[in-house]
Amino acid sequence: MQKHFILIAISLAFLISCQKESNNNVNNYIESGSALIVNEGGYTRNNGSISYISRDNQVVNNIFEKSNNGQIVGDVLQSFTRVGNVGIICANNSQKVIFVDARTFKQVGEITTGTDYPRFALGVTTDKAYISNGSSSGTVLVVNMKTFAVTKTINVGDGPEEMLLSNGKVFVANSGGFGTDNKISIINTTTDAVVSSITVADNPGEMEKDAQGYLWVLCKGNVTYPAPTYAPDRQSAAKLVRINPSTNTVDREIEIIPATADYSAADNLAVSGDGSKLFVCIDDKVYQLPYTATALPATPVISRLFYGLDVHPFTGEIWGLDAGNFNEAGKIIRYNSNAEAVDSFKVGIIPNAVYFNL
């Protein structure tokens, strides 16, 4: 499903692009420093896709189709991740999870049972992965990465989203789905069972790990859309919450949108490769925080609306994902480490995430 807040594209001057488009089958989509772009596509339009951007700026769109004889990857792609030599694609509205050879992108497996709303995958070991699933009462699916079969289903909170692995535990953000939740579930990766939970602010969804190993959680706050106007009505503040994974406790909260700001939305938490800087989008602004921050900076580093955001782990470049009019090809806009726009790349429809090959 597309994101809860409808983003309104802002028209700015066009950037000079250094894009080199290619229709060739690269056959090596794991080049270190390259990137894979998840293009979710329009809801019910079955036009989700994956784009590849090499280190030398060669762009190949629709790589799944190119590697699988024109087969469509799915409707509303949510995420891609890699576990060893296998890539995992979660397709929400197709209610399936696809496994591909990460180098060639040829399909090697698929799960369609128990995947009513697959969101994110996480490699626990090279032989085991977790997949968050569910728009209301949520689950985490335990997947055998050799057989591509679900071996266990773990009940968590409502609307589980991103997951992080730390100290032999997996932390699951329960976003509330189309409602509300305020818990982080903690799974023991040896027993594949929930052992505890942490109460944070409302609607946690995205998580990143900083240079000290702390977990930062973007809690978007509870927002309702009452009739007859269905205008957003903010019920609680949006916050960045820091968790100590050794003690399973919250040790810091930063309010980034007060509960009175009805029309403001927080999204797209990202971290620099060294874990020293955090980035978060609030409406049409991107803020940069040091991992020692106790408050949101007064001034953003970029003023532009993005549907997704990430930071290149090697170069420190900020990659902003622009969905445009949500019907035509979107683009990636790259900024250097000083937040100065450098170039742009045309990708698929509604780009929402970047996976960087390490």
Image (cartoon, rainbow, N blue to C red):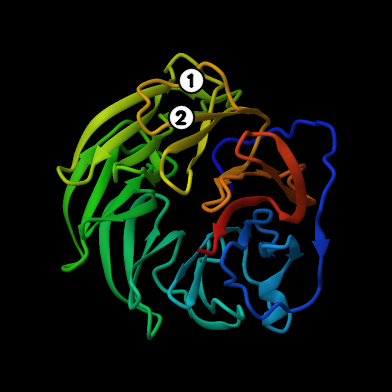
Q: Residues within 10 Å of mark 2 (few under 14, many from 20)?
A: some
Q: How many marks?
A: 2
Determine whether the residue tagged by mark 2 lies in a helix, strand or loop: strand
Judged left or right of residue 209, residue 334 is right
Residue 97 % position (x, y):
49, 70
In the current view of this chain or complex, which residue is farthest to the top? 260
Three-letter amino acid code at the position of disc 1: Pro
The residue lying at 27 percent from left, 28 percent from top is 252
Pick whichever of labels 2 and 1 is earlier in the sequence: 2
Q: Nearer the viewer, residue 47 or 12?
A: 12
Q: Can I make out residue 235 in this image?
A: no
Q: Nearer the viewer, residue 135 or 131?
A: 131
Q: Alpha-carbon distance for marks 2 and 1?
A: 7 Å
Q: Nearer the viewer, residue 206 or 60?
A: 60
Judged left or right of residue 334, residue 271 is left
- Numbered circle sitting on residue 220: none
Residue 259 % position (x, y):
42, 18
Please identify the quarter of the rendering in which residue 308 is found: top right
- Numbered circle sitting on residue 289: 2
Q: Is residue 276 above or below residue 327?
A: above
Q: Which residue is mark 1?
A: 297
Q: Nearer the viewer, residue 86 or 221?
A: 86
Q: Can I make out residue 93 in this image?
A: yes
The residue lying at 65 percent from left, 54 percent from top is 43
Residue 39 % position (x, y):
65, 57
The residue lying at 58 percent from left, 50 percent from top is 315
Determine whether the residue tagged by mark 1 lies in a helix, strand or loop: loop
Three-letter amino acid code at the position of disc 2: Leu
The residue lying at 32 percent from left, 31 percent from top is 201
Please identify the quarter of the rendering in which residue 227 is found: top right
Residue 158 % position (x, y):
34, 47
CB atoms of marks 2 and 1 within 8 Å: yes
